C-alpha cells in the first residue's frame, strides 16, 4: 500500500485512534493513555534501575499488552515496562490490544503467568493465590488451585502458608528492594519458631541463597532431634529422664532426676 505523501506508517496508526479505541491489534499510543491494573499482583517494583537504563537506551522493546477501558487502556502485562518508560521520559509506547474478557479469567491468566516467571514477590503471590481460592467459583480447593496454575499441591500449600507468617515479617518482605525466592519463603514459613523465622528471613533478605536457608533449617531440625538421657539410682529406686540435647539440658535433666528420686524416697517412708 502506498503511503500518503508526508505520512509514515506510525502516523497512520496514530490517526486510526482518533475515531475511538481500537478493539484489538498492535498500536502506538501515548503513555498517558495506559492505566495500571489495581488488581495487579505486583505491589512492589524492585530493581528498576537497569530496566529504566535499558528503556532510555533502546526504548520499550516488548509491547505492553492491554485491553480497552474507558478512554484509555488497562495494562494486562507490562506494568514494570510502563513504569520504566515513565521514569525514562518516554512519551509513546507500542501496545498490543486484547479484547476485554471475564475478570476472573483475566486474573487467573495473570496469576499463572506470574507463577511461571516467579515475577512477583512471594507475599503478593500468596495473597493472589488465596484470592483465587476464595473468589473463583471454579477453584474450590487447593487441589483445584494446583491444577489451574500447574504446580504441585504441596507447593500451593507452602505458598499459602506464607500468609501465616507474622504481619511484620510479611511487610518486611513486601517492601524490601531485595526479593526472596518462593522456595526460601515456603521453607521459612514452615519453621515453627517465630524468632528463627525472623532470623532466617533477615538472612534471605541479605542475599543468603535458598540452598543455604535449607541447610540451616535442616541443621536446626537435627539439633532439635538430638536427645540426652540421665539415670540415677537411690536404693531400689531408679529415675531416668530423656530430653532434647542442648545448652543447659544436662543440668535441667539432672535436677529433674533428683526431684523424682526425692519424691519417690519420701513417699516410701
Image (cartoon, rainbow, N blue to C red):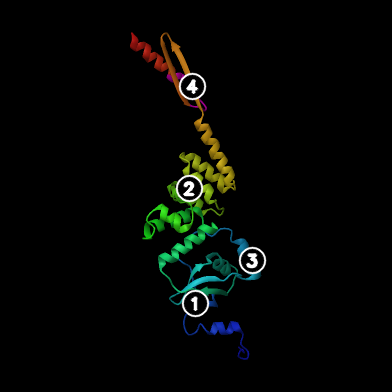
Sequence-earlier tag: 1 or 2: 1
* CB-based contact (under 8 Å), mark 1 and mark 2: no
Can residue 122 be seen in this snapshot? yes
For label 1, the residue is: 24
Crowd class of label 3 (few under 14; some 14 to 19; many from 20; radius 10 Å): some
Above or below — where is 232 with respect to 61? above
Crowd class of label 2 (few under 14; some 14 to 19; many from 20; radius 10 Å): some
Instruction: Give the structural element (helix, strand or loop) at label 3.
Output: helix
Point out residue 141 in the picture as x, y percentages from the top left corner: 39, 53
Instruction: Give the structural element (helix, strand or loop) at label 4.
Output: strand
Which mark is on residue 54?
3
For the residues labelled 3 and 4, the Cα–Cα distance comes to 63 Å
For the residues labelled 2 and 3, the Cα–Cα distance comes to 33 Å
Range covered by the magenta-colored residues = 244-256
Sequence-earlier tag: 4 or 1: 1
For label 2, the residue is: 169
Nearer the observer, 82 or 65: 65
Instruction: Name the residue at the right extreme.
Output: 57
- Check residue 254 for magenta coloring: yes
For the residues labelled 2 and 4, the Cα–Cα distance comes to 37 Å
For the residues labelled 4 and 1, the Cα–Cα distance comes to 74 Å
Residue found 52% across the figure and 77% down from its top: 25
Amino acid at each position: 500500500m502506498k503511503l500518503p505523501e508526508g505520512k509514515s506508517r506510525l502516523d497512520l496508526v496514530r490517526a486510526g485512534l482518533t475515531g475511538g479505541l481500537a478493539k484489538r491489534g498492535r498500536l502506538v499510543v501515548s503513555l498517558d493513555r495506559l492505566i495500571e491494573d489495581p488488581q495487579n499482583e505486583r505491589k512492589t517494583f524492585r530493581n528498576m534501575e537497569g530496566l529504566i537504563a535499558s528503556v532510555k537506551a533502546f526504548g520499550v522493546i516488548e509491547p505492553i499488552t492491554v485491553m480497552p477501558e474507558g478512554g484509555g487502556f488497562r495494562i494486562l502485562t507490562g506494568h514494570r515496562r510502563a513504569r520504566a518508560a515513565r521514569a525514562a521520559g518516554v512519551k509513546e509506547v507500542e501496545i498490543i490490544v486484547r479484547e476485554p474478557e471475564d475478570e476472573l479469567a483475566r486474573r487467573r491468566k495473570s496469576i499463572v503467568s506470574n507463577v511461571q516467571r516467579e515475577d512477583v514477590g512471594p507475599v503478593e503471590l500468596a495473597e493472589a493465590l488465596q484470592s483465587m481460592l476464595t473468589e473463583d467459583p471454579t477453584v474450590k480447593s487447593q487441589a483445584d488451585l494446583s491444577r489451574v496454575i500447574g504446580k504441585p499441591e504441596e507447593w500451593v500449600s507452602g505458598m499459602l502458608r506464607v500468609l501465616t507468617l507474622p504481619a511484620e515479617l510479611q511487610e518486611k518482605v513486601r517492601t524490601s528492594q531485595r526479593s526472596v525466592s518462593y522456595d526460601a519463603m515456603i521453607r521459612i514459613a514452615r519453621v515453627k519458631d517465630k524468632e528463627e523465622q525472623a532470623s532466617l528471613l533477615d538472612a534471605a533478605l541479605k542475599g543468603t541463597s535458598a540452598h543455604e536457608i535449607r541447610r540451616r533449617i535442616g541443621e536446626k531440625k537435627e539439633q532439635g532431634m538430638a536427645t540426652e538421657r540421665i539415670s540415677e539410682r537411690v536404693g531400689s529406686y531408679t529415675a531416668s529422664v530423656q530430653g532434647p540435647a542442648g545448652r543447659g539440658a544436662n543440668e535441667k535433666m539432672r535436677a529433674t532426676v533428683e526431684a523424682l528420686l526425692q519424691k519417690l524416697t519420701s513417699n516410701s517412708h
